[in-house]
Every structure is written in structure tokens, then in C-alpha cells.
Image (cartoon, helix red, strand yellow):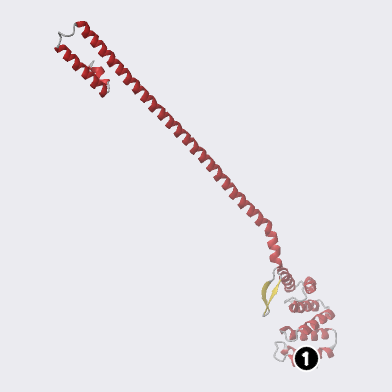
Amino acid sequence: MSTRLGRIRPWLRQSLVLAVLGLAGAGAHAGIFDDDEARRAILDLRQKIEALRRDGDQRQVDESKRQAEEIANLRRSLIDLQNQLEANRAELSKLRGQGEQLSRDIADGARRQSDALKPLDERIKRLEPIMVSFEGNEFAVEVAEKRMFEAALASFRKGDFEPAQGVFADFLARYPQSGYANSAIFWLGNAQFVLKDFRSALVSFKKLGGRNPTSARAAEALLAIANCHLELKDTANARKALEELLSSYPQSEVAEVAKERLTRIK
């Protein structure tokens, strides 16, 4: 009995105690109740206690079920939330992957565009003028123009006079207004002179003198004209060119050479 009472809730234990006290009072008045009545009272009490116990147990079972259902619902909610978080992580990872792929695609596109534009850039650079300084003068030239002149001059300095003559002639035909033009005419005349084409050389040097009489090449052109006339056995015109040189450019570097050459002609 004591074990059962220990499991009964406080309100049930209170009811049981009151019932026992009632029995105790009944025992004090034994004359009032006979044994049958006492047994019936005990049976009734036991039935009431058992009903109370069953009712308490049922309530406990119902409460446990309710709590279990709440826990189950909470677990389902947690699982749903976890699944949603996993789905969000997967979607975020997918979006991140798409973003990285897009970045790679953009970078690849930029590289392809850059590679496609390189030939165009190189062509544009070849066409864009550049500033050069040559023989005391500074002027703008095209890249191809500069390369052509330098190639012709390199051929002349190596002693390849015939190829140099052809390249200088082509250069002047292509770039007649080039800042290199006076020098190109001068070296063309020298190549022609070395190749013993004195009449062509004479034309080149006269053209040079007529283009810019105040240039540093003008005095040299007059000396070269005199040399061409001497090679052609035309001493009169040779003397005339030398005298013009001494008259127009007495302080030039070639003036002394002109004096010596004029002395020999006389």
C-alpha cells in the first residue's frame, strides 16, 4: 500500500489520508458499523483510490503523449529547417559556382578580345608617327618609314651600294616629304657616285642643294657636284661649283677641301 501511495500524486495522497482518517474514526465507533459494512467501506475506498489512480495515470499518459507529440513536431520542424538550410547551402554553392564560372568566362573573353586586338594594335602602332632626332633635326616619322631609311643606310655602310641605291630611291618615292629626305638624297648620290653613275649622282646632289641651301648638307652637295664634274672631265663646271662653295659656305667643314681641289684644277 505504501508503495502505491508513493506513486500517487499529492492531491491523490491527500484524498487517501482523509479516507484513512475516516476509517480510523469509524474504528473508534465500532459499535456503529458491523464487519460487512467495514469491508464494503474499504472496498469502496479502494475502488475510489483505484479510480483516482487510473485517472491520474491516464492524465499522465495524456500529458506524456502531448509532450511526445510536441517533441515530435519540434523534431520535424528542426529537420525541415535543417533540410531548408542544406537546400540554401546547395543553392548558394551553385550560385557561387555560377559566379566563378561567369568570372572565368569574362576573363577568357577579355583575353580572347585582347589577343584578337593585338594584331590591330600592332598595325596601329606601325601607322602612328613617332618622334626621332637625326643629324641635329627632330621630326615625326612612321615606324615603317624609319625602318626603311635605316635599312638603306645600313646597306650603304656595309658596302652594299647597289641595294642601298635601290632602297634610297624607293624611300624617296614613298616618302618625298620625310624628315630623312635630305639625308636619303645625299646617300643616294654617294651610292651612285661609288657605282660610277656620275650623271645620276650629279642629279641627286643638285637636287639636294636646291631643296635646302642653308642645310649642313648644302656645302657637301656642292663639293660632290664638283667631284662629279671632274669625273666627267668637265673642269669648268667643277671650278664653278667649288667657287660657289667657298663663296657661300666659307666657314664650312669642306671649305678647306674645296680650296685644295680648286688649286689643283688651276
Quadrant in the picture for residue 221: bottom right
Q: Which quadrant: the C terminus?
A: bottom right
43 in relation to 184, above or below: above
Q: Residue at x 19, y 16 (%)?
A: 22
Q: Residue at x 53, y 39 (%)?
A: 90
Residue type, label 1: Glu
Q: Nearer the viewer, residue 226 or 83?
A: 83
Q: Is residue 259 visible?
A: no
Residue 98: % across, % down = 58, 45
Count of labels in the image: 1
- Crowd class of label 1 (few under 14; some 14 to 19; many from 20; radius 10 Å): some
Q: Which quadrant: the N terminus?
A: top left
Residue 261: % across, % down = 77, 89
Residue 73: % across, % down = 43, 30
Q: Nearer the viewer, residue 247 or 237?
A: 247
Q: Nearer the viewer, residue 119 or 87?
A: 87
68 in relation to 102, above or below: above
Q: In terms of secondary structure, where does tag 1 sit?
A: helix
Pointer 1: what residue? 244
Residue 7: % across, % down = 27, 20
Q: Nearer the viewer, residue 228 or 147?
A: 147
